[in-house]
Image: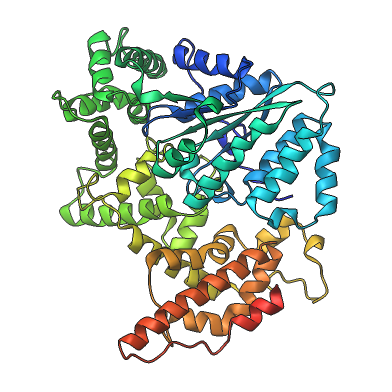
Amino acid sequence: MPYAAEAPFNSYQSQHEPTCLHNTRVDVLQEIRNWADGRDDRRVFWLNGLAGTGKSTIARTIAREYFERGHLGASFFFLKGGGDAGHASKFVTTISLQLANIVPALQYYICEAIAKRSNIASLSLRDQWRQLVVRPLSKLNGNSCSSTYILVVDALDECNDEKHIRNILQLLAEVQLLKTVQLRVFLASRPEVPIRHGFDKMPKAERQDFVLHNISPAAVDRDISTFLEHNLSDIRQEYYLEPGWPGEQVIRRLVKNAGGLFIWAATTCRFICEGKGFAPKRLNTILKGSSTSATTPEKHLNKIYVTVLKQSISLDYTDEEKKESYRMLRHILGCVVVLLSPLSAKSLNRLLDVTKQDMDQTIDGLHAILDIPKDPTIPLRLHHPSFRDFLLDKNRCSNPELWVDEKQTHRTLAECCIRIMSTSLKQDNCGVGAPGVLVTDLESSWVEQYLPLEVQYACLYWVQHLQKCGDQLYDDNRIHHFLQGHILHWLEALSWMRKISEGIYAITSLESIALVSWVLQRHKRWRTYRLDIRLSPLIRVYS
């Protein structure tokens, strides 16, 4: 079955993500444990909180704890722009496979469901859920396994489709129907509208709510103080700073400036640590840039992000050099935050057609907001999704040198995808030399040799970027020429990638864009849009 490899809490890509420090978040963790280990009828626990309040860290802590106790049934950590972890298409199958691994008795019933419907992974989320999760669990007698398992779902608000969010909430409520084996659902998210409405439809007797940002400010500040003391102590030891640095008074100022946001504290510590021997100087930069007057936590977070971004541009540059550096920063960082699946620095500079030097110089000072692996082939990732929200919001990122226009960035990425596909795709993309070779006969390493990851990204997502930028289609433009010369090469590449179904959806989306463009152009008395290669027959052929 399809599986979102990056979604579980302990995936390879997430291995360095933190859990709660000892003696922090004590009350909320105990509240969750009491619910998870209890026998009441509330099978769903909703931890909701504002951005940066530490929801994912708590979710990861609970997942780790119950995994080690043998009671974690499965976990799915949504991540916008995280490839398969950014949408719901593999949510149920990923949950089902994890359950089968942790509860061996389930394997027979899940395989039975697949044998009855070989296309089960392409059915609706509801049918997948009932046949791959609820029905197999209901067939267990309770003697062959533990009676209670926890399902941890984090950042449901990061799922890319509100309809899927509502569907998932409806499906999760069905765990209430299980009798012999309990599946308890721990869900963490922001209190976004579709999630609130979904929980409003769930009887209060079947769920427990915990509002993270309503915890006593004194308790939150105490935990943030512990976090800061721990991390700054590590920095002091690593760079041989004077004993007692930075001091209790500075810690108190930092705690106040954090405004209850753990992400502010975490970003600050990474920024200071990145300065190495200049850590005290960076600490002073933070303290000088922080207002002592009362303001919203979000504004404090905005300030720390602006500080990090401005510090990445050398003060010694000329005005012209600074202007060019900010342009490159917006270009590269904007693309990183709107990518639909993460890419490495190596793949990204090829996709964007920028030099390795420009890429390295631009991201070198951004370790506080980006996870930048030493290995240039490992994907770049945001430390926290709140940075994406900040960078794309003109009201929050009011500096025109830093603000990123989301639509324009999608347009740029669509153009980059078309360019790299036009120069890379050809007949017999993988050089097999024989038309009868099966996809299963080629190793993935062979496919990557001929179709590098940046080319695979372009093949998968160019239509989605085109949709998101809202551009129309015209005769004789770059997209028209690409389809005339490469549509079959593109579909062949998707076949080698085992993603031909995504190609069919992309063609359907492309036809919708073309239809809208045709209507708009006709209304304006422009010439109609047409494609010399018709798309509908291809849908029938490749279906």
**Colour pattern:** rainbow
Specify the quadrant that holds the C terminus: bottom right
The picture places residue 520, in percent across and down from the top left corner, at 35, 81
To which quarter of the image does residue 293 belong? top left
- Whether residue 261 is visible: yes
Residue 58 point in image, percent of width and height = 49, 24
Where is residue 322 drawn, in percent x and y? 22, 52
**Is 315 on the left-hand or right-hand side of 44?**
left
Compared across the picture, whether 379 is left or right of 428 comes to left
Could you say which is closer to the camera, residue 88 or residue 292? 88
Residue 176 position (above or below residue 493): above
Observer-nearest of 240 and 345:
345
Q: Is residue 74 above or below residue 65?
A: below
Look at 54% across and 81% down and name the residue there: 483
The structure residue drawn at horizontal position 65% and vertical position 48%, both measured from the top left corner, is: 126
303 lies left or right of 45: left
Above or below, 531 against 123 in this view is: below
Q: Residue at x 37, y 39 (%)?
A: 386
Question: Which residue occupies the foreground of this view, 94 or 319?
Answer: 94
- What residue sits 18% from the left and 30% below the top? 289
In the picture shown, does residue 21 fall above or below 417? above
Residue 100 location in percent, x, y?
Answer: 77, 36
The number of numbered badges drawn on the structure is 0
Q: Is residue 86 visible?
A: no
